[in-house]
Amino acid sequence: MKKTKVLMLGWEFPPIINGGLGVACLGLSKALAKQVNLTLILPKSDHSLLLNQIDIIGLNQQERVRIREDFQTDFYAELENVYTLPANILPYPSSVAAPVATTKKVKKSRTKKVVSTEFYKPFEIDALYGEDTIQKVIEYATISADMCMDWKFDVIHCHDWMTMLAGVEIKQRTGKPLVLHVHSLEYDRNQGNNNNWVYQVEKHAMEMADVILPVSDYTGSIAIKHYGINPRKIHSVHNGVEKIKPFKIEKPFPEKIVLFIGRVTQQKGPEYFIEVASKVLKEYPMARFVVAGTGDKLKELIETGAHKHLGLNIHFTGFLSKEKIHDLLAMADVYCMPSVSEPFGLSALEAAQFGVPCVVSKQSGVSEVLIGALKVDFWDVDKMAHYILMLLQDPAFAKTVSANAHFDLEHCTWENAAVEIKDIYDQLLA
């Protein structure tokens, strides 16, 4: 049976990542590539991205040629900018064929125009997110759409707002069905402020899309309620988690560890974590609270911890590699995710894999699949502190919570997510 050809547009992809989006794109791509022919366009990739069955194209490694000559034909006269690309585009520059020379019959003209050709460097992007992110998103959309016009594909699959402009542009040019994978929404990230460019891009793209895949029912409900999207377009597909072999590390101190992992931003609720720490330490001083991550709230959080005299009982690690995060999980006794609005929450699944009992916000997608976790409203710091105290003081209870959550992990796989998405492709193309 002929495999579906999928053009996937992503922004983050390991090892070049900022958060959970890149991890999710990797896990889904690897599972989905077993069922479809997958081509992935990224703004930035490096030579370590060698994955079987996936054609990975980093625009930072692709050269373009802009032709600025008068072909003296009506067709080209109508076009302001014409680009050529290598006929056989492959992921890495060493294997990219040279641009094929184009010859045209030039009509005789009384005034001969000068023929000049300008070579453009590969798409230049330093950090994936910065002051010029919007500009880079627009450039990415233009280049991606130009690049794939001669390719054969059946479905366009976009990840988050950074690739939505590109997806809409390609759909309008080709008529191919557009699938939007929504890992988060501006309504979440900006705490309900809908009067900005990113929100408008998301709304327009979701209106144009054929199918929307939010990573949770929670995120799907936001698309319906706050973006006015037709619920018939929405099909939630929960994230999976990469299977890892858990291990344990002996702590270099006697205290138990309560762990927060994530971006230190308002959306993730780190200030509630500090408030909970203050309450727990009053009754259980033999605990250490660890904040693993960085963000615009980090300085304020450190100052709050000092103001509350938490001293040696709270630690701020900054950004940590995947290996260091696993080392922390191997030592942790409780994982706490007090997010104000969390589309999913992959770190909770990773904690569950390490056998760490989890206390998670009810305002999260992961609470839909991690049934065995303890759930609480993000603002209810008293209840959150109570749950953490129970887990720290009662090893048998902690073991039961951990075992229940570990059972839930059997269904949280990227393979299951890929099967759901493949079925959606089939329905679109039927």
Image (spheres, grey):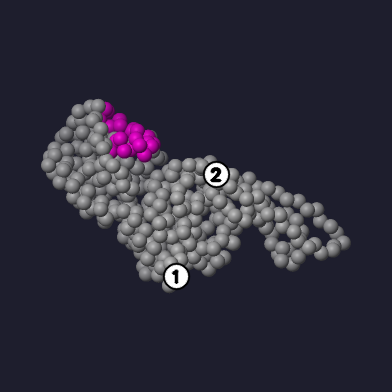
Residue contact between numbered discs 1 and 2, judged by CB atoms under 8 Å: no
The image quadrant where one finds the N terminus is bottom left
Local crowd size for mark 1, using a 10 Å CA cut-off: few (<14), some (14–19), many (≥20): few
In the rendered structure, does residue 98 fall within the stretch colored magenta? no
The image quadrant where one finds the C terminus is bottom left
In the rendered structure, does residue 317 fall within the stretch colored magenta? yes
Q: Is residue 115 visible from the viewing direction of this image?
A: yes
Which corner quadrant of the image does residue 228 belong to?
Answer: bottom left
Mark seen at residue 189: none
Q: Which residue is mark 1?
A: 429
Q: Is residue 391 left or right of residue 235?
A: left
Closer to the observer: label 1 or label 2? 1
Q: Which residues are magenta?
A: 303-329
Disc 1/disc 2 C-alpha distance (Å): 35 Å
Q: Which residue is found at the position 49% from the left and 56% from the top?
A: 39
Instruction: Reply above or below: 155 against 85.
Output: below
Q: Is residue 24 visible from the viewing direction of this image?
A: no
Q: Position of residue 247 (x, y in %)?
A: 26, 37
Looking at the rendered structure, the secondary structure element under dot 1 is: helix
Q: Position of residue 183 (x, y in %)?
A: 39, 54
Q: Which residue is mark 2?
A: 125
Q: Position of residue 327 (x, y in %)?
A: 30, 35
Amino acid at pointer 2 = Ile
Amino acid at pointer 1 = Leu
Looking at the rendered structure, the secondary structure element under dot 2 is: loop
Q: In the current view of this chain or complex, which residue is farthest to the front?
A: 1
Q: Which residue is found at the position 59% from the left and 62% from the top?
A: 150
Residue toward you, 42 or 194 = 42
Between discs 1 and 2, the one toward the N terminus: 2
